[in-house]
Amino acid sequence: MRALLHIAWRSAWNRRLTLVLTLCSIALSAFMLLGVERIRTDLRDNFTSAVSGTDLIVGARTGSVQLLLYSVFRIGAATNNIRWDSVEFLQSQPGVAWVVPLSLGDSHRGYPVLGSSDAYFEHFHYGDRQALRLREGRVYTDLFDSVIGAEVADRLGYRLGQEITLAHGSGELNLSDHADKPFTVAGILQRTGTPVDRTIHVSLEAIEALHLDWIGGAPLPGMRISAEQVRQRTLQPKAVTAALVGLENRAAVFSVQRQVNQHAAEALMAILPGVALDELWDVIGTGERALLLMSGLVALVSMASLMSVVLATLGERRRELAVLRAVGASPYHVVLLLVLEGFMVTLAGILAGVAALLAAVWVLNPWLQSAFGLTLAATQASALQGWMLLGLLAAGLLASVVPGWRAYRLSLADGLSPRI
Amino acid sequence: MQALRFAWPRSQSDCLDIESLAIMPGEKVFIHGPSGCGKSTLLSLMAGVLSPRQGQVSLCGKDWQSLPVAARDRHRVDHVGYIFQQFNLLPYLSVIDNVLLPCRFSRSRHDAAVTASGAMQDAAAALLLGMGLARELWHRDARALSVGQQQRVATARALIGSPAVVIADEPTSALDEALRETFLDLLMQACAQAGSALVLVSHDHRIAARFDRKLSLPEINRAAAIEAAA
């Protein structure tokens, strides 16, 4: 067996140029299959862990997926705000334990700014009902204090006491900014692996203060209220983007949802985060299946190419097989030789694919994290990934059994004197 | 070989019909005949690769047809060393690995080599030196060697572990005259040392003089006689 392995290896090495191409296509299929599956599971994990312990999300009427995306994941923008009296209405509902108002729309160098109350740090949970923790500093006490996520701090190199200016709207390049009212970094949160890491948190009053001298998304001409003057004003917010609602008893969730949806004073919508996530999966699922199908096809093509390459070289190798037969290899040895070759190529291809995936994840992770808040855990293999690799390996073996069978027939027919 | 008849599949008439042929241990037999007269077929029958339509072929007291396929392969490698006309070697293996191949597939060849020389590498070394192949060639890939050198490596391989019979199918036809003589000297000498019988087929009469026995295949083959008469 060891001798045969040695022969298989030397023989394959002798034809390495053709085999390397096949190896590459197998590596690509392993890369795609594992990569798609990785993104699929990690996307779900990331999204699912982004919000926990919140029973309802309330916002202006829109699609439930859209509300979820902009309120929790800061993807897209709200079409409409909800008035402050609606927030008060929510708080007054029986069974409602807490309401965390959220105000979005500003940014700092591409990172979203979230205005909220102190209740946010108390009630917002992520992952497995974990609360937000400060890595350094404290929650905002002054009007122009801010608490930044770990990703913002690490990416931009911000420390406590850093002065930052916010910009109106989202995006990296923003001309209309709030340079007249700079904020100070008062606290830095621990990493959570959720959109919180990319968020700059300020108080609702601060958001209100920033926009006192603004109307309809632009500064009022001729009207300037300085940072000092702003402190004298009442800064009760008039509207927010959305609100997170926690209930005393989860069983009441549908009756509260109905109350909110039927609220007469303003058109509101309440969604259950889990249900909205399921809707999101339905949307994404189609794309995922298409990608998975593509990866499957690539795998199929690479197996076919493995089979055809080994089959095609068989003609040239009749002499080699006859020599092997003459020195005592049985036709079974010949089959084994070809199957070993297919196995080696498949295994090497899979290893190359896995290595490429690890490298790609390592290179792309910082970008994925800052652009989408998505962290890929390449080293945590799922059971399905294991099965995929085993499946690939089995397919490789199967694909080399066909040339093996042909070689068996050839070497029986040729005996020791191949007709070339 | 007794009352042997052989026909290729889908062929109407027999291609070989031999009454009897016996080769003694250590004997050196030369079989000649024009090309296409069935010399290679006869060798394949001797080596148990092909089975006769009728009659019996035995090697070392064992009838090939009584053996199952896997046992035939084992019996062949245990007792037969085979030399082709050319392209005898696996081009991607080193010279010494090529010589050692029969020992890897056959326990008894391995054991015989070890008994003779202490280790199979030593047996290979002794044979290669005997074939006049310099030590620095041994670890080169076989494809780096000239045709003459390759035939000598093939001979060393056929003889390692002292098989009962060495079958050589036109081993000299790819060699020029000077090389042919040296090669035959070495082959004869090595067979004598190993105590192996040698069956060599060729269409070349000039080398016949060196052998114990000379056979003309058309003369012993009754199928050819019938064909000639018709």
Image (cartoon, rainbow, N blue to C red):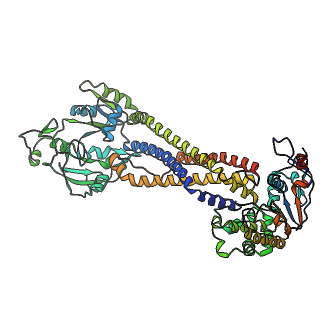
Q: Position of residue B23 (x, y in %)?
A: 90, 62
Horizontal relation, residue A278 to residue B70: left or right: left
In the image, residue B185 above or below residue B205: below
Horizontal relation, residue B23 to residue A338: left or right: right
In the image, residue A95 above or below residue B13: above
Q: Position of residue A330 (x, y in %)?
A: 75, 54
Within the image, what quadrant is residue A16 found in? bottom right
- The answer to which of A287 and A128 lies nearer the viewer is A287
> Residue lying furthest left in this view?
A222
In the image, residue B199 above or below residue B138: above
Any part of residue B54 in sight: no
Any part of residue B70 in sight: yes
User: What's the residue at 21%, 57% (across, down)?
Assistant: A161
User: What's the residue at 90%, 65% (across, down)?
Assistant: B213
Q: Position of residue B206 (x, y in %)?
A: 82, 65
Q: Quarter holding the N terminus of chain A?
A: bottom right
User: What's the residue at 68%, 59% (across, down)?
Assistant: A4
Horizontal relation, residue B185 to residue A72: left or right: right
- Give the number of marks: 0
Horizontal relation, residue B3 to residue B104: left or right: right
- The answer to which of A360 and A158 lies nearer the viewer is A360
Q: Position of residue A291 (x, y in %)?
A: 46, 40
In the image, residue B101 above or below residue A106: below
